Image (spheres, helix red, strand yellow):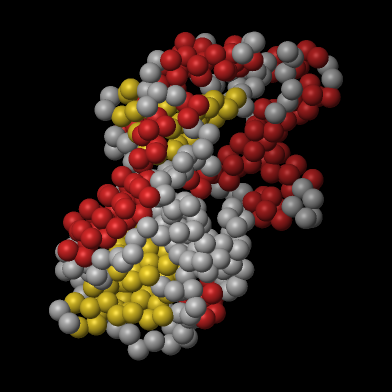
Amino acid sequence: MPDFRFVHAADLHLDTPFDGLSRLGGDLPARLRDASLTAFDKLVAETLRVDADALVLAGDLYDGPDRGLRAQLRLRDGFARLAGAGVQVFLVHGNHDPVQEGWSAIGAWPEGVHVFSAQEVEAVPVTRAGREVARVYGISFAHAQTGENLAARFPKTSDAPFAIGLLHANVGNNPAHARYAPCELAELTGGGMDYWALGHIHAAQVLADGPVHAVYSGVLQGRSPKPSEQGAKGAYVVDVDDGRVSGLSFRPLDVVRFEQLTLDVADIADAGQLQDALQAAAADAAEAADGRDLILRVELTGRGAVHRQLRQGAGADDLLQSLQEAGPGLGGAQVWWDRLIDRTAPPLDKDAIRRRGDFSAELLTRAEALLADADRLEAFLAAHARPTDRRLRDLVADSDAASDRATLAAALDEALDRLEPDE
């Protein structure tokens, strides 16, 4: 066992309503309504399983100021299980659940749970067998619209064995999220904390990995098909030895997973083959998700014969409906088809372009001649690349190797592929 182990999670959004997804029908709305609560149960179970000393929660425990009763009771019961095992819990409130907005049905939390106030940064020890093994510093949002740099309030030095900064904030002005409690990474890494347990950004990411760690654990359960909500969601298990992070492990804890896949239709002859390919891709995604329920979007790309079938009438919509009507079952997982995004193009008939005798035909002829002669291709690009095209000029300058010539050829071939075919 390490000297000290804790679990870092954030953005639980308990009892989130998953607006807009009830249209997928079946029992999905009920599954989604329970998903955030079940993910929290899994967080508690994982914290106990790894024998952690503490659980730190970096804001947005609730989805909004109304703070549903189910969410509050589930939180209390989970904290009671942790308290019974001697696990301390530390939490701050964020922009979705600020201290001075909303209501509370819980008069007192279980022993060992500390809720940081919104007045000032507090420091609370983490103890094991009566000995301080770490200290958690934190401050909550008083109101949702918190534009103050709360990181600036944290101490610049600490005499703690290991200092954890618990903060809900937008570090580096991430454009995908609102600019609440904004700060810069340099402020965090230059301060007195050893580990910043961050919340607010829903994609798990390690902003700094030593000697000061700054980590977003991400949302515990994805909430929509948006990019930041896709993929595995969960929490970090953090090991500390000799006052430094010695292990950082992400643990997926989500119940329903949002994924967006990309499928190239180049080798697909018709809609029947396309449906088979989509179902095979869904099966692979379900296997990668370890049996979790999936909500899938698929982007169809590339040139192929199936393009015209997708654009014939309501082709793409009909295919999506066929997938949905086939049922959500896929082995042990439930797969729900959300959307097909058609970005396909018709096949490119180069012979037909040559016969047109226009600019495209001339361009194709000249380009193919360059592609057939690597030396001529390099000379052409070196002569005609603009002075401002630094990346291309650097590539040409270093293009002695066969792999570099192949890169240039591939780029030109890709440009040819964008020629408009005859419809």
- Left-right relation of 362 to 400: right
Residue at 17% in and 82% down? 130
Residue at 31% in and 53% down? 73
Above or below, comparing residue 92 to residue 321 in the picture = below
* Image position, residue 273 (x, y; %): 46, 13
Above or below, comparing residue 386 to residue 266 in the picture = below
Looking at the picture, tell me which residue is in the foreground, 258 or 397. Answer: 258
Residue at 61% in and 49% down? 399
Above or below, comparing residue 280 to residue 191 in the picture = above
- Left-right relation of 189 to 31: right
Looking at the picture, tell me which residue is in the foreground, 88 or 224. Answer: 88
- The reply to whether residue 269 is in sight is no
* Image position, residue 262 (x, y; %): 50, 32
- The reply to whether residue 321 is in sight is yes
Quarter of the image with the N terminus in it: bottom left
- Tally the marks: 0
- Left-right relation of 389 to 33: right
Above or below, comparing residue 260 to residue 2 in the picture = above
- Left-right relation of 73 to 96: left
* Image position, residue 407 (x, y; %): 59, 42
Quarter of the image with the C terminus in it: top right
Residue at 53% in and 42% down? 226
* Image position, residue 339 (x, y; %): 53, 27
